Image (cartoon, helix red, strand yellow):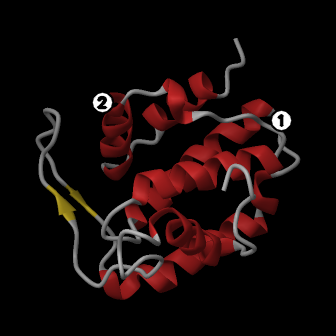
Amino acid sequence: MRTNGLPQAEGFALLKAIHRCLFQDIYDWVGQPRTTALFKAEFEGSPLGTSFVPPNHIDREGKEIFRSLAAENNLQGLDRADFIDPLAHYFNRVNILHAFREGNGRTQRILWEHVAEIAGFALDFQGITRERMVAVCIAGGQGSEEPLQRMFVALLDSE
């Protein structure tokens, strides 16, 4: 995808298409929303687990997330300071959606790098450790987007 570009799709369909491209040789259910409930038990010292969107709500919620993002012009036209909060918010919503049985993180990182690029920003997740990503996602699942905002400040910081 880095060489040939992303699939020709928009919104929730783009998320599914990215997943399909990444995992087409691995899973037979590639690009299809999960049909089973997912819950991550406590992890990395967090006393609470994370519940993801129930499978029967994934399609509706996924479409709504991307409809809202499109209504905000996919975050285009914002300066850096105004870009971070909505990026963290939508990242968190898609993370809680957890549309697929496997591969959500990798799929989402490609999506958000694309959103940042079309909005005029360079976003590279290579600077984030797995431990920090887990911690900010747990915080987001528990209702706090501030750690996600701080992560994006660091990831968008060209220095």
Question: 10 Å neighbourhood of mark 1: few (<14), some, or many (≥20)?
Answer: few
Q: Nearer the viewer, mark 1 or mark 2?
A: 2
Question: 10 Å neighbourhood of mark 2: few (<14), some, or many (≥20)?
Answer: few
Which residue is the site of mark 2? 131
Question: In the displayed image of the protein, which residue is found farthest to the top?
Answer: 159
**Please, is residue 96 above or below residue 9 in the view?**
above
Image coordinates for residue 6, horizontal then vertical, percent = 71, 62
Question: In the displayed image of the protein, which residue is found farthest to the bottom?
Answer: 56
Q: Quadrant of residue 71?
A: bottom right
Q: CA distance from mark 1 to mark 2?
A: 29 Å
Q: Which mark is residue 79?
A: 1
Q: Name which residue type carries label 2.
A: Glu
Q: Which mark is residue 68?
A: none
**Please, is residue 40 above or below residue 18 in the view?**
above
Q: Is residue 128 left or right of residue 21?
A: left
Q: Circle 2 sits in a helix, a strand or a loop, which is it?
A: helix
Q: Name the one closer to the observer, 37 or 106.
A: 106
Looking at the image, which residue is at 19% across and 63% down?
A: 39
Image coordinates for residue 42, horizontal then vertical, percent = 12, 46
Q: Name the one closer to the observer, 22 or 73.
A: 22
Question: In the displayed image of the protein, which residue is found farthest to the front?
Answer: 25
Question: Answer yes or no: do the residues labelled 1 and 2 have beta carbons within 8 Å?
Answer: no
If you read the primary sequence from the N terminus, does the residue marked by circle 1 or circle 2 appear first?
A: 1
Looking at the rendered image, the quarter that the C terminus falls into is top right
Looking at the image, which residue is at 69% across and 49% down?
A: 2
Q: Is residue 24 left or right of residue 136?
A: right
Q: Is residue 143 left or right of residue 81?
A: left
Image coordinates for residue 113, horizontal then vertical, percent = 65, 46
Q: Quadrant of residue 32?
A: bottom left
Image coordinates for residue 129, horizontal then vertical, percent = 39, 27
Q: Circle 1 sits in a helix, a strand or a loop, which is it?
A: loop
Looking at the image, which residue is at 47% across and 72% down?
A: 24
